[in-house]
Amino acid sequence: MIAVYLLLLVPLAGMALLSFHGHRADAGRLNVRFNALALAASVWLAIDVLINGPELSAGRLLYIDSYNVYLVALTAFVGLTTSMFSGPYMAHEQEIGRVTARRLRLYYAMYQGFMLAMYLVLTTNNMGVMWVAMEGATLATVLLVSLYRTPESVEAAWKYFILCGVGIAQALFGTVLLYFAAEQKLGVGGEALLWTVLHDNAHALDPAILSLAFVFLLVGYGTKIGLVPLHQWLPDAHSEGPTPMSAILSGLLLNDALYAVVRCKMLVDGSLGTHLAGNLMMGFGLLSFLVAALFLHRQTDIKRLFSYSSIEHMGLMTFAFGVGSPWATFAALFHMTTHSLTKSAIFVTVGHAAQLAGTQRMDKIRGLILTQPTIGWGLLIGTVAIAGFPPFGVFASEFLVLVATMDDFPWLTPLLLLGIGLAFAGLFRHIQPMVYGDVPEGQKAITANLWPVFMHLALVLWLGLAIPGFLGNWFSQATQLIAGSLPQ
Amino acid sequence: MAITELTLYQQAILLLAGLIALTSFLMLGQSRLVRLVLVFALQGLLLAAATALAASVLDYPHLYVSAALSLLLKGIVIPVLLQRLIHRMGLHRVMDTIDHPARVMMAGTALVVFSYYVSLPVVQHSTLVTLNAIAVSLAVVLLGMLLMITRRQAVAHVVGFMSIENGLFFAAVVSTYGMPMVVELGVAFDVLVAAVVFGVFFFQIRSSIDSLNVDQLSKLTEADR
């Protein structure tokens, strides 16, 4: 259990220290060290859970089971590799004068603050604290989106703040309703918001109130997942903020919001015994998936392009969790992992590509593979992976989603295939000239730190070829927890 | 159930609920930013009064803490902060008029009716007071959103945002006798940080578009730039 406390204390200490030392030259390395410590704590925690099973902390405030333990490890891993990339990247930004030393300090402190909020969302046992941490993540990142202080970035940050703030207020209303329903059965007191208690008593909770609560929770946390039509903030925030932040927003924040929705779904399913929650999620998910795939085609900004790709994949996961059969749930859990790894790798590469070309406009980024082969290949392989080509992990997980949909809702598979095809076409028509086109005059190679990218892509490749036993085991256990039975 | 059959406490809560909804409507119609913030402060005071009343009548001591928090945050700190910002930015003479006040008011009324309709499933399980509290708090949340939609000034958006939080607090206090303490403190902390971040943003927005009229924040669109 000590590992959980460590996991939360490390980023807290990191935030405190970096808010004083963040402007120093070694702040980037310090940031990496803190994230490495957090990763070590999460690995320790993972081994602990692997051996001893689900754990509940004293005071029952923190809870770790097979559903969140792998997300904790994933969060720590992506947080570490992104911080490795962000050190030199931010140093470069400071060199060309886009950020000052003071803002760099803000950046590093908020990076740790964001990680803290993410760990808290994942590990807390209290639905209310989960909400507080989710709002905390918004507050930590909102100042990062406007870090460059351009009119566009201020606009994006304002939109992000208002839309996510109002959206997540709906989730708080849902949480209040949840508490209201629970309190009638469990009595007044701190017990009635504990997830473990709620889950054990889900069948006793009032279905009418819970279905009302779920609508608010889905809309609230759905805003953070970036579900259409609540997605408006996402492309703006991703494209105008610093690139390392896009990587952790896409790789971690969206996952964690979806995690919260699925936790709520488990309660509502237990109470209602119908497929209402699943149907709502399927509808929202499918809409996001298709709309985002179409929007991929008309993008001009490379970071906007990949943020729409994130919406598309989050939509697919929401859909798969909504289908709710064991296989679909397994596939969604798997897809969460592969998408996080691939998408954060892509954003790291995109950051380098944009620095190389000096712009984010795709019609100005050309000839990557000739100027700097590692960046060109990184972008190409990353795009191949995210578009769902074998043998990468995204292919395996998308294929599983398709198979699972075929079982329960066969008439929806053509729509899924259409979306995947559209997204594939949308990505490659933009990527191909960027990678292979003629080199613009005077484009020189930059110092790039690409081994986080290739580490991620290697992992995705590994996951596509074989899922390691312990991970498959966690996915199965989590599936059993969420869907009620094991995938056959 | 006739209103005279209710206990005095319940009648008082209903009255406060009505007043809180009224302040939301007042905000909706108020075009001067200074007065808008004043009405918001009044709403915060009413919220604190409702919480304190529930604490003393129902004997939940921890509600006193949240009453104090509401009073301090919503009734004093945030309004004072906003007033000072308004004066520092020279916005106290700015009129943020709405285009069709009558239509906005009608829409607000419709939202209240809608809130009662949505809360109907709850009434079968609880008292009249809870139904009213949940319906009114949902209405306050929706009216806050309407306020944000109809206004152009960033300050008005912040007031709308904060009054949404007021609605949520009211629901938590009256229908469930307050959330657990750790949640309540966390939410209050978030609100405070949000208020500070808003303050930072006012300066950023003003330095980027030279006013606080967020209608001018429209550079980012889906169409080709």
Image: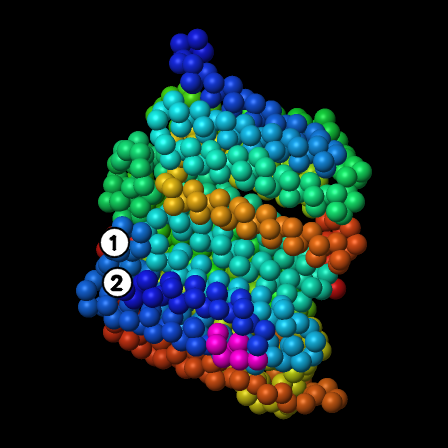
Residue A194 seen in this snapshot: yes
Instruction: Pick whichever of labels 2 and 1 is earlier in the sequence.
Output: 2
Q: Which residue is mark 1?
A: A58
Q: Amino acid at mark 1?
A: Ala
Give coordinates of residue A12: x percent, y percent. 43, 63
Image height of A265 relative to A439, above or below: above
Q: Which residue is mark 2?
A: A1
Q: CA distance from mark 2 to mark 1?
A: 9 Å
Determine the secondary structure under disc 1: helix
Image height of B82 relative to A134, above or below: above
Determine the secondary structure under disc 2: loop
Give coordinates of residue A249: x percent, y percent. 51, 64
Q: Tag 2, which chain?
A: A
Residue A293 seen in this snapshot: no
Chain part drawn in magenta: A25-31
Q: Amino acid at mark 2?
A: Met
